[in-house]
Amino acid sequence: MSTATMPGIFRQDATVISLVGFAHGTSHFFHLMLPPLFPWLMSEYSLSFTQIGTLMTVFYVVSGIGQALAGFLVDRWGAHRVLCLGVSLLACSGILVAGAPGLGGLYLAAFIAGLGNCVFHPADYALLNHRVSQARLGHAFSLHGLSGNLGWVLAPLLMTASATAFGWRVAGLLAALAGGTSLATLWWKRAELSDARIGEPASHGGHRQRGSGVGLRSVLKLRLTWFAFSFFFFSTLGFGALQNFGPSLLRHLYGLSLAAGTSALTAYLIGSAAGLATGGFLAGAATGQEKLVGFSFLCSAALAFVLSLSLVPGWTVIGIMAVMGFGVGIAGPSRDMLVRKSAAARLGTGAFGRIYGLVYSGLDAGLATAPLIFGLLMDAGKARFVFVGMSIALLAAIVAAQAIAAEARQ
């Protein structure tokens, strides 16, 4: 490669990473469109933690099922088209929240939001794997995760502030505006993500197309698929508890106010974002991604268990949450590289959309299950067991990560 082409490649990589990251941040914003509004919704409709948690179960069940199928649409129809469709549905869900006449309207909004959310991982990772040069993939995965965390950080702050000042229906309109802005950006820069360019030759040559004829049955028969699905399921099961009930959980265990509990959740997300940024520099190693995942998850599992004991003073909780988030975040880019390496070895790069769609649906499965399991624990007054469950889930994810690495070596 001549040095003359290097600035052009850098600009292309930076543009693709930025556009995909912005879209990913939008999807994560909508993950937390509803949970910050739970106190208002529970008061208005007299709902329990379990009942309000089912809104997010609907969201993630729809997203998980749809994500497994969206990967095939990405490989067939093109990632950009599918991505724009998903963002459009997210914007519509915000409008539905704003105009919801009752609980049924909120369920409809959660359904539409889940349908929109399902496209992001297969579409995003297909674009990154096919458009970003190999040398920058680790950083691409890092920034992709970082943008998602930014969406998680902004959503509780903006949704809570707007609901407090103007009411929860106005907060729904704010979410719709965020989705509309993202869609306009993707359409404006559509030439950079043109579906026609997905098949362009790259450094992988003919290997890129291997796997383009792989069907659903073949993917489902692979042990790799189920190991990776399990890894994502368990790694997000614990986060689902924090996402839905974090402030209430910390109020029960440590007597923190709603504002302090929200700050602790924000600290977790900021810590996770810092971990993702750091992890991008570590993910490019040829081997050993599973070791980094195992060590960092083990540290976070230990901290979750410490929080379950209620032995530390309340003023330390925000710091502990930040460190726990860092441990989960730093593993993110290595996690994505591990799945990429294993998928390419088993199926070829032509099946990226399908394999990412199926295994990343484990994220949605974990987040859909969390409100049911941990909502019951909260209603039963067993708040400390929520942190115990988080610790166990992270340990199970470590086992799954080692199994993925073993499959890649075979």
Image (tube, rainbow, N blue to C red):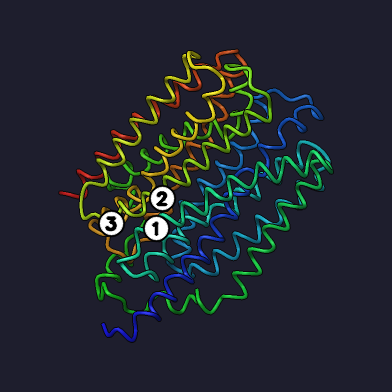
Q: How many angstroms separate mark 3 from mark 2 (CA)?
A: 24 Å
Residue 217 pos. (x, y %): 34, 52
Which type of secondary structure does the marked residue at label 2 adopt? helix
- Going 68% across and 37% down the picture, which residue do you hit? 36
What distance separates the C-alpha of mark 1 from that of mark 3?
24 Å
Q: Residue 284 carries which label?
A: 3
Q: Which of 74 and 386 is in front in this view?
A: 386
Crowding near pointer 1: few (<14 within 10 Å), some, many (20+)?
A: many
Kind of residue sitting beneath label 3: Gly
User: In this figure, which residue is indicated by the disc labeled 1?
Assistant: 354
Specify whether 398 is left or right of 245.
Answer: left
Counting from the top left corner in percent of width and height, residue 364 is at 50, 42
Give the amino acid type for the residue marked by disc 2 in the picture: Leu
Question: Residue 279 placed where, x, y %?
Answer: 36, 49
The numbered mark at residue 214 is none
Q: Name the residue under label 2.
A: 358
